[in-house]
Amino acid sequence: MLAASVIGFGIFYLLPFLLSFAYVLIDNPIHARFVGWGNFKELFHNKYFLLGLKNTLWFMLLSIPLNMLLSLLLALALHRDTVRQKYLVPVFLIPLVIPSATTAFFWEKLFHEYGPVNQLLHKLQMPGVDWFQSPYGMVIMLVIFLWKNIGYNMVLFLSGLSSIPQEYYEYAILEGAGRWQRFRQITQIYLRPTMLLVFIMTFVNSFKVFKEIYIITGETPHESLYILQHYMNNMFLGLNYSKLTAASYVVTIAVVGIVTVVFYLERRLSREF
C-alpha cells in the first residue's frame, strides 16, 4: 500500500536531490569546471549566506521554545475545563485557515508606518517606528509565527494530555505530590512523544515564515529579516544553481542531523524511565 508513495517520493524528490549533487562539485552548469568542495567554502565566506543563517538560527532559537511553552501552558489551562475548551480551541485554530497573503496584509497594515500601532504611539507622545525596516521586524515576525501556530500545537498537547490515565494523578495526590511533582513525574514523562511531534512540527513550520516575510517586504527586506530562504531564492533567480544546491545540502544535512539527535535523545530518555 505504501509502494505508490515510496516510488513517487523516490522519483520526484530523492532521485533529483541525489543527482543535483553534481552541481555542488562544479562552478556553473555552462562551463562545468570541477571545483570540489569549493562551493561550500565560498558559501561559508558569503556575507549574505552568513546573515541569513544567523537570522534563521536566532528566529528558530526564539520561536520554537516559545511556541512549545505557550501552547503547553494553554493546553494545561484548558485540559480540565471542557466548557472553555469547547469555545476557545476553535478560536485558536482560526489563524490556521487564514491564507498567508491575508495574514501578511493584516499585519502589514497593523504595523505600517502610518498604521494603528504607530497612531497609538503618537497619541502616547512616543515616536513611531517603521517596524519592517528596523531591527524590530523580526520581533513582529515572531509574533505572527506564534499567533499562527500556537493553536495547532495546543490541540496536539491536549490530545497527549487526554491519553494520560487520571488514576496516576489521583494516586499521586493521595501520596501528597504537589502540582510541580505531578507535572515532573507524570505529565512531562507521558507527554514526551507528543513533545517530540510538536517540536518537529514547529521546527518545520519555522521555515515557513518566509512566506509572510516575502509578501510583506519583497525581495529586499531589512537585514534583520533576511533569512536563508532569501539567499536561496536569490540564487535561484540568478540561475546560480551551484550555490543554490550547496546551500540546500547544508540546510538538509542540518535539519536531518537535528531531527536525528532529537529522536536519539527521546529514545534514550524513554529507556531511562
Image (cartoon, helix red, strand yellow):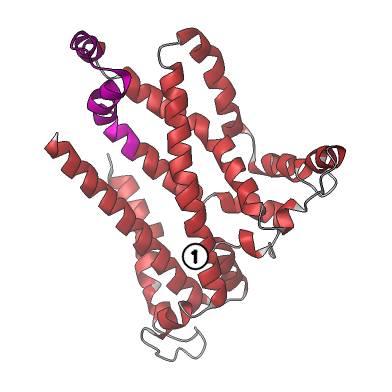
Q: Is residue 185 magenta?
A: yes
The residue sitting at 27% across, 53% down in the picture is 260
Q: Is 105 above or below relative to 87?
A: below
- Direction from residue 116 to residue 20 in the image, left or right: left
Query: Is disc 1 surrounded by few (<14), some (14 to 19) or many (20+) residues within 10 Å?
Result: some
The residue sitting at 48% across, 80% down in the picture is 45
Q: Which SS class for mark 1?
A: helix
The residue sitting at 13% across, 38% down in the picture is 272
- Direction from residue 25 to residue 70 in the image, left or right: right
Which quadrant: the N terminus?
A: top left
The residue sitting at 37% across, 57% down in the picture is 255
- In the rendered image, residue 221, in percent from the top left (x then y), is placed at 68, 62
- Direction from residue 22 to residue 83 in the image, left or right: right
Residue 129, can we see it?
yes
- Residue range corresponding to the magenta coloring: 167-196
- In the rendered image, residue 38, in percent from the top left (x then y), is placed at 41, 85
- In the rendered image, residue 174, in percent from the top left (x then y), is placed at 20, 8
Identify which residue, 211 or 122, lies in the foreground.
Answer: 122
Which quadrant: the C terminus?
A: top left
- Report the magenta stretch's main SS: helix
Q: Is residue 194 magenta?
A: yes
Identify which residue, 142 or 39, lies in the foreground.
Answer: 142
- In the rendered image, residue 213, in percent from the top left (x then y), is placed at 64, 53
The amino acid at mark 1 is Leu
Q: Which residue is mark 1?
A: 53
Q: Quadrant of residue 198?
A: top left
